[in-house]
Image (cartoon, helix red, strand yellow):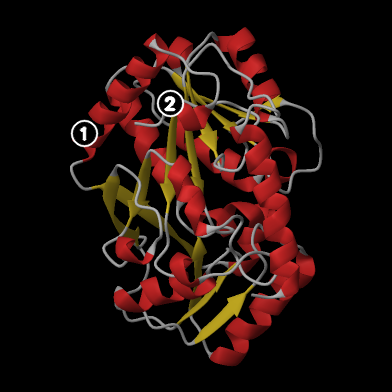
Amino acid sequence: MNLLSDIFGVGVGLRNTLYDRGIFREEQLRGPVVSIGNLCVGGTGKTPFTQWLGDRLCERGIPFDVLSRGYGRSSTEIKVVDPNGAPCEFGDEPLLLAKHFSSKSRIDDETLPRVIVGPDRYQAGLVAEKEFGPRLHLLDDGFQHRRLARDFDIVLLAPDDAGQVLLPVGRLREPLRALRRADAVVATAAVKIEEYPIVPPRIWRVERDIVLPPRLPADGRVLAFCGIARPDRFFGDLRRNGLYPVGELTFRDHHGYGAKDVEKIAREISSSGADCCVTTIKDMMNLGDLVHRLAPIYAVDVKLALVDGEAAIDEMLSVIEERKRTPVRNGHEQRS
């Protein structure tokens, strides 16, 4: 392993040890906390999975909120996300979640899921509980945010996670053995669990697909572009669904598009002979008002659904209920 990754690993290991031994304190919220995270930097589908899980909680009448760091936003103030706001204020993924849950008109205002952003998710949780009461909290990208104690840890795996090395050389945030803290992993059929040194007690298989916009011309020449963590997956999804772009452009993850970016995309559309362009829901939102300069443009959405998902949620809620009856100070001691 590279020396830089070795140094990074020592720091991660020391921090985890301090939490495991109770030297660093985990803070408790009144409401139960379900963490949704991963081992690698980005690209495992946390946002669509959070949407799916939130939808199932809504169907069961379970009030909840989402606590998120709000990566890429312009302030560090704790805020309740306004679905009509801007990515620069709240972060693109929290804003996507707020828009998604606010669109559920069947939910009355008192139980409407809220998204709260703040660099310290414990403090964000305190604000949430003061404003909306001790609901269930979904901790977005929370596997490494150990300051906030959680009652159930979900880790999403990508097919290539097992072959990664630690940051800053690779994509791993912590070693694969960190899966010992997980209560469940969410994985597509392509993920080989036997490649991991630790097998969590619950393996939830997920089906993943994209949803092409109905008005997208099936036989048109399209330019595809995106600013996400794993752009190759997006382009591959398009091809698997019969859409073969005449050109592809990539930007950094969470990219906030400016006029020069739009000009670059427009030039690529012209030079490739494309009739239109296609991107992700997140990129469409990050374009803001500039999106009109690229018309016709279409957004592709990603959908995730657990196989036997209702049984998985039943099990998760059962574990949470049991742990709330017999709370333990350190999260690693209460794993079952």
Label of residue 197 in the image: none
Q: Is residue 254 above or below residue 227?
A: above
Q: How many marks?
A: 2
The amino acid beneath tag 1 is Glu
- The residue positioned 54% from the left and 81% from the top of the image is 248
Residue 59, x across and y down, in percent: 28, 25
Q: Is residue 122 above or below residue 235?
A: above
Label 2 SS: helix
Label of residue 310 in the image: 1
- The residue positioned 65% from the left and 50% from the top of the image is 13
- The residue positioned 45% from the left and 75% from the top of the image is 235
Q: Which of these two is toward me, 23 or 116?
A: 23
* Left or right: 20, with 53 as reference point: right
The quarter of the picture where residue 7 lies is bottom right
Residue 50, x across and y down, in percent: 43, 40
Which quadrant would the N terminus be assigned to in this image? bottom right
Residue under numbered circle 2: 334
Residue 226, x across and y down, in percent: 57, 68
Which quadrant would the C terminus be assigned to in this image? top left
- Disc 1/disc 2 C-alpha distance (Å): 23 Å
* Left or right: 50, with 253 as reference point: left
Q: Is residue 226 above or below residue 124?
A: below
Residue 185, x across and y down, in percent: 37, 48
Is any atom of residue 255 visible in this view? no
Foreground label between 1 and 2: 2
**Callout 1 crowding tier (Cα within 10 Å): few <14, some 14–19, many ≥20:** few
Q: Earlier in the sequence, mark 1 or mark 2?
A: 1
The amino acid beneath tag 2 is Gln
**Callout 2 crowding tier (Cα within 10 Å): few <14, some 14–19, many ≥20:** some
Label 1 SS: helix
- The residue positioned 42% from the left and 51% from the top of the image is 156
